[in-house]
Amino acid sequence: MDPATSINDLPEEKTIWNRNFIGSVITNLFLCLGHFSVNTHVATYATFLGAVPVVMGLLTGMFFGISLMLKPVAGPAMTKIDKRLLMILVFFVGGISNLGYALFHDIGMFIFFRVLNGIQYGFVGCLTMTIASDALPKDKMASGMGLYGIGGAIGAASGPSISHWLFELGAKMQNDDLGYTFIFLFAAVVFFLALIPCFALHPDKKTKEQVASTGAWYKNIVTIHALPTTIVMFFIIAGYAIYNSYVFNLGDELNIGNVSLFYTFMAGTMIVSRPLSGWLCDRYGVSTVVIPGMILFAASFIVVGFSGTIEGMLVGAVLAALGIGGTQPAIQAMCMKSVEPLKRSVAGNTMYIAMDSGFFVGPILGSIVYKYTSYAFMFKVAVVPVLIAFVCFLFILPMYKRRLRVLEEDERK
């Protein structure tokens, strides 16, 4: 056996509920709680500080741009350096960034700390997902990724509500400036609290010889074996980004009130759909989960696009959550299982390039459609990337199965 295949000798956990997996779930919860509490107010805070619309848009989308630029650094770093140390560093940077938002109420300083926050974001999502996958048994990978995703769902559901309450509290006590300060201080505390499970993680078990076997840094930016699932994820996220960006705009266009309930229903459904779909994927196979999930996800855009009432939009929210909750854990598990254990950081880095690109491209394409039509028509058109993802999945499924057979043969050698 050559050095490159010896990495399969890395110890494998026998149960989902081990220290590193539990730690990754908790840190992901804190990450999403802080992320969603702040990011829903970035545009309004930039405007409050006097930013022109172009600067406001730049600050809103900066996360994804900086994250993409850092991928040539993030992948190799996660492969070569102890991921526990990286987790401690990136959550410390996240805490400092949000503390900076709270202390310095100036557009220049806000841009500086936004860049710093973006650097953290370039590492942290892929890092927590990789630590979670490293801690999972192969036969329970999808189940674990589904449970891991609960943190994101809870953060998406509760973060905006908590930050809105904190803003109202500060505004009543003094003014809007204090309201924003409360939001940023809350996020800073959340990120600093996340350091506790970070310190509790086990260090990497890889040896110097195993790290050396991964090759030069440029070989650890992307992996060709993760590209098929990455392409599918790109189109899924490009559609999902429409929900992240334009639901409130659609509500205004149609004069629908209480549109925030859309996100509450979506997040609440994901808390159930993600772990359930992961369990079904491990038990019955990826196609049994992904194909129905994509159909439901596509149907959600049609329902929302044709709906003129809050009731119809909430039905669409449930369908969307069942769809994205059904597909995302399975696709993530496919990505991680398509490479050797030591290359999971590279696979995660490859997938996050697609996810960041999808979050960046999706809203831009949606805005182009809106320019010539309407928000309602935009949501109808958003079914297109999901249908492309569906076709891509059917195409790459045989490739994925062949790749698993190759890895199994390597393990037996």
Image: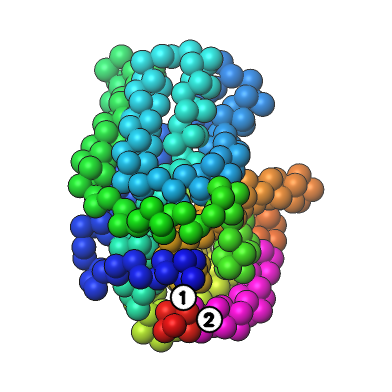
241 displayed left or right of 207: right
Q: Nearer the viewer, residue 264 or 144?
A: 144
Q: Nearer the viewer, residue 356 or 169?
A: 356
Q: Secondary structure at mark 2?
A: helix
Q: Which residue is mark 1?
A: 1
Q: Which residues are magenta?
A: 383-408
Residue 406: mark in rendering: 2
Residue at point 34% right, 66% down?
A: 10
Visible residue check, residue 272: no
The image quadrant that residue 91 belongs to is top left
Spot occupied by residue 138 in the image (x, y as percentages of width and height)? 36, 74
Spot occupied by residue 220 in the image (x, y as percentages of width and height)? 55, 53
255 versus 354 height, above or below = above
Spot occupied by residue 3 in the image (x, y as percentages of width and height)? 47, 66
Label 2 crowding class (10 Å Cα cut-off): few <14, some 14-19, many 20+?
few
Visible residue check, residue 114: yes
Of the two numbered discs 2 and 1 on the same chain, state the one appearing first in sequence: 1
For the stretch drawn in magenta, what is the main secondary structure? helix
**Separation of residues labelled 2 and 1 (CA atoms):** 14 Å
The image quadrant that residue 376 belongs to is bottom right
Spot occupied by residue 351 in the image (x, y as percentages of width and height)? 54, 58
